[in-house]
Each structure stands twice: as C-alpha cells, then as structure tokens.
C-alpha cells in the first residue's frame, strides 16, 4: 500500500500532520547520506518539493518520491547525459519530467545521490536500469495539473 499526497509548499508540516495522525510517537532520523527515516517504525516515507508544491509518499515498504512542476523549460542540454534509448522517448517537457522524476525517485529510494548515479541510471520503457542491467524496482508516475510525480519501490 502506498499513500500519495500532493500538497502546498509546506511539505514538511504536511508530513508531520500525516505522521501524527498515523503514529502515537515517532522520531525522524537521517542516514549518513541524508535520507530521512522513522526510528524503529515499519512505516516508510519520502517527500519532494518543487516550486510551491510538495509530494509525499507513505508506505509500509521503502519508497522514494520526486515531484517536478511544469515550467515550460528547455531540456535539450541535460538530456545529452541520457542514453540514446531515453532520448528517443523524450519529445516534450512532460516526457523529460517522467524520466527525471523516475531517476530522482530511484535515488531517494536507496538514499543515493544523483552525482554518484546520474551516469549509471537509465529509465527506459518504464523501467530503471543501472549500468545497463534492469533493477528490481517499480516506478509509478502521477500527472498533476502542476507537474509530474514519481514513486519508486522495490518489487
């Protein structure tokens, strides 16, 4: 089960409200790489913010979430870092955001950084690949009026 919440810019306050409604007490800690988690609780979460919007994913299993809002941006410079297969799937901003949010959600799922994994990750045909090999993860995309969200979980 994964619960998805789109909220305003106060994503951390909304997360606190959600956790308060689900748990009697909790403590949010961070791993060495900065990934937040709940001490001693089986509930997992991930959050992201972009512009004045936020996305929260809460699950019983590890989860990574990312949100990017539409900005009518150009993306040609950054997709030069993507594989040829990926570039073939990107024709407009929405396509680019699906690819970008999938990558970010994967990175957040495992508490990695884009700097260490950007060249290794490929999102193609709805699947994440690392070093050319398929991963055992599932990516779900959500299209909102404001942008694109992605949630990544292990299969």
Image (spheres, rainbow, N blue to C red):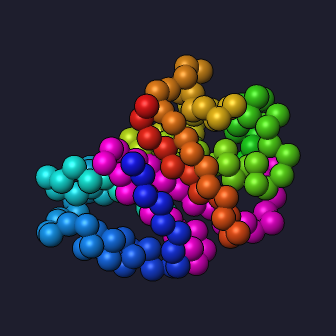
The x, y position of residue 31, in whole percent, is 26, 51
Magenta residue check for 117: no
Is there any visible trace of residue 77 in the rendered image?
A: no
Depth check: give the residue in front, 22 or 129. Answer: 22
Question: Residue at image x 79%, y 37%?
Answer: 89
The x, y position of residue 2, in whole percent, is 42, 52
Depth check: give the residue in front, 93 or 3. Answer: 3
Q: 15 above or below 68?
A: below
Question: Residue at image x 80%, y 43%?
Answer: 90
Q: Is residue 7 left or right of residue 32?
A: right
Question: Residue at image x 55%, y 22%?
Answer: 134
The x, y position of residue 10, in whole percent, is 45, 80
Is there any visible trace of residue 98 in the rendered image?
A: yes
Which of the 4 image quadrants contains residue 74? bottom right
Q: Is residue 85 left or right of residue 14?
A: right
Where's the C terminus, which quadrant?
Answer: top left
The x, y position of residue 118, in whole percent, is 57, 39
The single residue placed furthest to the right in the displayed view is 91
Depth check: give the residue in front, 52 or 14. Answer: 14
Question: Residue at image x 45%, y 63%?
Answer: 56
The single residue placed furthest to the top in the displayed view is 133
Depth check: give the residue in front, 98 or 42. Answer: 42
- Residues drawn in magenta: 49-76
Image mark count: 0
């Amino acid at each position: 089960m994964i619960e998805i919440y789109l909220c305003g810019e106060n994503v951390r306050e909304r997360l606190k409200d959600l956790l308060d409604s689900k748990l009697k007490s909790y403590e949010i800690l961070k791993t060495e790489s900065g990934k937040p988690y709940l001490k001693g609780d089986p509930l997992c979460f991930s959050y992201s913010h972009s512009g004045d919007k936020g996305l929260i994913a809460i699950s019983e299993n590890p989860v990574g979430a990312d949100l990017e809002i539409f900005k009518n941006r150009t993306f040609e410079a950054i997709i030069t870092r993507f594989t040829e297969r990926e570039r073939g799937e990107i024709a407009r901003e929405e396509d680019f955001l699906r690819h970008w949010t999938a990558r970010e959600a994967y990175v957040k799922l495992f508490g990695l950084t884009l700097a260490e994994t950007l060249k290794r990750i490929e999102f193609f045909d709805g699947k994440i690949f690392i070093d050319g090999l398929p991963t055992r993860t599932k990516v779900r995309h959500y299209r909102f009026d404001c942008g694109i969200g992605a949630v990544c979980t292990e299969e």
